[in-house]
Amino acid sequence: MRKFWAVAILLLLAIGAGAFYFRFYFVYGEGVKSGELNYVVKKGLIFKTYEGKLIQSGIRSKAAGSIQSYEFNFSVENKELAERLMLEGGKVVELRYKEYFGALPWRGFTKYIVDSIITHNIPALPEASVLNNTQPTEQLQLSE
C-alpha cells in the first residue's frame, strides 16, 4: 500500500510540475507590436519589475458609442533594455515580445514580456532616398 501512495504522490507532483511549467514558462506566442511608447516604470511592493505601455495607432470601442486607442501593456525582464526604453518615451518604436499563459510576480505584472527593440529608419517617400542619394538603414535589433 505504501508503494501505491508513493507512486501516486510522485505522479501528482510530476503532473503539477508539468502544469506549472506549461502555465508560466511555455512561450505561447511571439510577435512584434508597433506604436508610441507611453511609459516604462519600475514598480512593485516585493518584486520590483519594469512595466510599460505602448499606444498603437487605430481606434476601437469597448462600449457602444465610445472610442479608445489600442493599448499594449507589457513587462520587461532585462534591466538594460528597460532603461533604454525609458529613454525612448514618446517615440514610435517596434517591440518584440513573448506571450505566456500566466504572469509570475518576479517576471512582471503582465503575460507579455518584451525582449528587444526593433528600429527602422525609413524615409517618408521611396523617391526621397533616390533624390538625396541616401540609403535607408537596415533593421537594428537590441537584445539581451
Image (cartoon, rainbow, N blue to C red):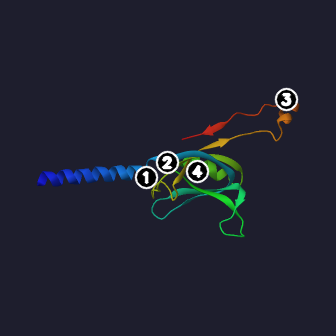
Q: Secondary structure at mark 1?
A: helix
Q: Residue at x 85, y 36 (%)?
A: 128
Q: Are marks 2 and 3 in contact (CB under 8 Å)?
A: no
Q: Amino acid at mark 3?
A: Asn
Percent coordinates x, y for residue 1 in the rendering: 11, 55
N-terminal label among 4 and 2: 2
**Which circle, 3 or 4, is nearer the viewer?**
3
Q: CA distance from mark 2 to mark 1?
A: 10 Å
Q: Is residue 110 left or right of residue 10?
A: right
Q: Answer yes or no: do the residues labelled 2 and 1 have beta carbons within 8 Å?
A: no
Please give the residue where the numbered disc 4 appears in the rendered image: 82
Q: Quadrant of residue 31 in the image?
A: top right
Comparing 141 with 18, the one in front is: 18
Residue type, label 2: Tyr
Q: In 3D space, how far apart are the residues under numbered discs 2 and 3 (Cα atoms)?
A: 44 Å
Residue carrying label 2: 28
In this rendering, position of residue 92 left or right of residue 84: right
As measured in the structure, the alpha-carbon distance from the residue carrying label 4 to the one carrying label 2 is 22 Å
> Residue drawn 31% across and 51% down?
15
Which x, y percent locates residue 120? 71, 40
Upstream in sequence: badge 2 or badge 3: 2
Residue matched to label 1: 24
In front of the other: 28 or 73: 28
Residue 72's disc is: none
For residue 44, above or below residue 77? below
Residue placed under numbered mark 3 in the picture: 133
